[in-house]
Image (cartoon, rainbow, N blue to C red):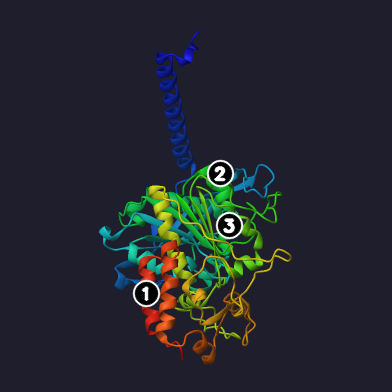
Amino acid sequence: MTHLTHAPGARRAFTLARHLKSAATAALLAIGAVAAWAAVPQAAIQAAPVGGHFLDRSAQISAAGYTDREFFISGLARTYRASSTLRSDGKWSAYVYSSNTPYNTPLLVRRPADPTKFNGIVIVEWLNVSSGYVLDIDWIMAKEEFLRQGYAYVGLTNQKTGLEGSKEKNPTRYAAGNLPNDDISYDILSQAAKAVRDQYQVLLGGLVPQKIVATGHSQSALRLTTYVNAIQPLERVFDGFVIHGRGNSGIKLSSGDLRGTPSSTVIRSDASHPVFQLQSEMDVNSQSDTSKATDSAKIRYWEVAGSSHSDQYMLEGVYSVSTRPPASCEKPANRMPFYRVQNAVYSHLVKWMKQGTLPPTAPRITRSSLLNRIQRDSYGNALGGLRLPEIDVPIATYGIDNSTTGSFEFLDLFACTTSGSHEAFTASRLSTLYPTHADYYNKYKAAADRALAAGYLLPADHAKALQQASTAPIPR
């Protein structure tokens, strides 16, 4: 006897039922996503006086057709607590513990003045507060890509230390600012994303966002790790994440939460939206457990050989809006052009979010099997990892150690110890490695071409790198 499901009519009925079930499941998931978005409280947005705000970069970006405006976002923020043990696999669960903490804090918006230049992507940066002031680190690092591709950018002050630093610099402008604690920082991030989506007429001058990305460096990356693992599954307000220079774990959900974070945490393997993790050599040297990350359909992890937590390029961006003189360090800061890799990260993320195109993978920095130490070549440069032409065709040792020779104040000490070092090769070594400039350039171009083909350099940065190499005084 023929089994019932093997009959042609039965097969069609079975197939139809299966498709209906899949459609119903998709509809329920879509409804759930909308419901999660709707659960985020609506914040109030107020425009601040034009100009004169902290981190005002108007003079730097106006020629590129960009505006730089500050707003204040306010409302009632929620706090979260863990509903179970926070495990090392990152599959954290959380619940809303309270929902009535008033706040008022600044956010800045940089966007193309010409709507036709907008690429539809809004980058929301969790501004870094490690210095005691807000710093737009990921703007500094990726500004070339943001400006040339037409991204809109939002810099959010959602930690108390950052707001207090702004008040110190301009007590009058930020007098109404109110961030009673950092427990509400996660929800303020969600509310800022919702405001971008729902109040784009005010915040973006009418530019309609297609995708919203959260990004953050260092301490902000630690908090974004917690956000991705615990908050994003609940709220789903972001379409993608860039976590730059993170530590081994995250930061617990609130100060009153008895459940702390484990010493080591990966990004959850069932992440709902793309998460790009970008680490310098210095990051993985001190936070080696981050190398446990596993690439998947929603996770990418890159380690850049020869790079440091901060570097010369980053410091120049910080000092361009700082009234503080540059720190005096024992060695010149690291000059590996890490920022070019970060440019590529955002470009890949956009294709990942919009088209489902997976970014390329990258090898991990090589470590010894015995002590897990980073392995180095005869010049002191790291082996393995994502490699830019500067490390494959070296003219210097790109180190991760430095110290201050001047002030031992925290800001100066921090600037020196995190910026790594650049120790140029001697003229005799350069002449041995590269007998002629043409020899140097040809080797450099071959390495740059490999990085371009691998997806670690964008075409615009590849062209810029070759132009610089063509005029470099090598050998000396």
Residue type indicated by callout 3:
Arg
Q: Point out residue 285 in the picture as x, y percentages from the top left corner.
A: 64, 68
Q: CA distance from mark 1 to mark 2?
A: 38 Å
Which residue ends up furthest to the right in the rendered image? 370
- Which marked residue is nearer to the observer: mark 2 or mark 3? 2
Dot 2 falls on a residue whose secondary structure is loop
Q: Which mark is residue 464?
A: 1
The residue located at (66%, 54%) in the rendering is 255
Q: Earlier in the sequence, mark 1 or mark 2?
A: 2
Estimate the x, y position of residue 418 in percent, counting from the top left. Answer: 59, 74
Please tell me in which quadrant of the rendered image residue 328 appears: bottom right
Left or right: 182 in relation to 59? right
| Secondary-structure class at tag 1 | helix
Residue at x 59%, y 70% (from the top left corner): 383
Helix, strand or loop for disc 3:
helix
Q: Which residue is mark 3?
A: 223
Which one is nearer the viewer's eye here, 183 or 426? 426
Q: Earlier in the sequence, mark 1 or mark 3?
A: 3
Along the viewing direction, whichever of 409 and 470 lies nearer the viewer: 470
- Residue type pointed to by label 2: Asp
Eyeballing the image, is 231 above or below 11? Answer: below
